[in-house]
Image (cartoon, rainbow, N blue to C red):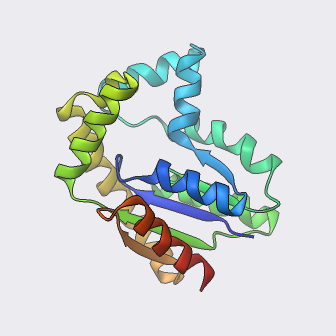
Amino acid sequence: MKNIILFGAPGSGKGTQSEKLIEKYGLVHISTGELLRQEMTMQTNIGVEIKETLATGKMVSDDIIFRLIEQTLLTQHEKGFIFDGFPRNKSQMDKLEDVFTKQNIAITHVLSLKVPQEELVQRIVQRGKLNNRTDDQNEVVIKGRIRLYHAQTTIIADFYKQKNIFFEIDGLNDVESVFAEIVGILEN
């Protein structure tokens, strides 16, 4: 069983690499971004709240994110999970560790895609235009999300580094090279 956290700032390529890993290993994909967008698309009360929060450049609350994720965590885990965009802070990490402890499973790999901020901003703006995502077209908001991501995730990286399951990958390489490096890490 592989239980992977794919770490990286918005625009680092997590979604692309997640898809490739899901196809190769049959993992259950948990993307907070996708879960949040589904709620916004369905225009649920939570979806409206999420849209308003993202439009101001803030992060969605832990309670909302964990409610959306927990259902998936508790229903499937035969081959493992890949977490895309989760955990984003210490509180989420602690909750995730608690759920896994109760189910006698653990994170096996934390893979961090490293990409410079300028490249991240360009990727996100392009993605926003292609997918008509207004939250991904404002550079000031994007830079704020990237700064917030780095501020909140340092402690998570340190925690998993101490467990010797944290690996950094150069996210500037082409998609196939990044994927080959990830597979090499997972299979060694």
Q: Residue at x 64, y 69 (%)?
A: 107
Q: Residue at x 73, y 62 (%)?
A: 80
- Vertical placement of 69 versus 43: above or below? below
Q: Where on the picture, by quarter, is residue 173? A: bottom left
Q: Residue at x 64, y 49 (%)?
A: 29
Would you say residue 88 is visible in this rendering? no
- Left or right, residue 100 beside residue 66: right
Which one is in front, 113 or 72?
A: 113
Q: Where on the picture, by quarter, is residue 171? A: bottom left
Would you say residue 82 is visible in this rendering? yes
Which one is in front, 127 or 164?
A: 127
- The quadrant the N terminus occupies is bottom right
- Vertical placement of 123 versus 176: above or below? above
- Vertical placement of 159 versus 58: above or below? below
Rendering coords of residue 167 (x, y %): 45, 76
Rendering coords of residue 81 (x, y %): 68, 58
- Left or right, residue 71 beside residue 63: right
- Vertical placement of 100 versus 72: above or below? below
Rendering coords of residue 76 (x, y %): 80, 51
Which one is in front, 87 or 84?
A: 84
- The quadrant the C terminus occupies is bottom right
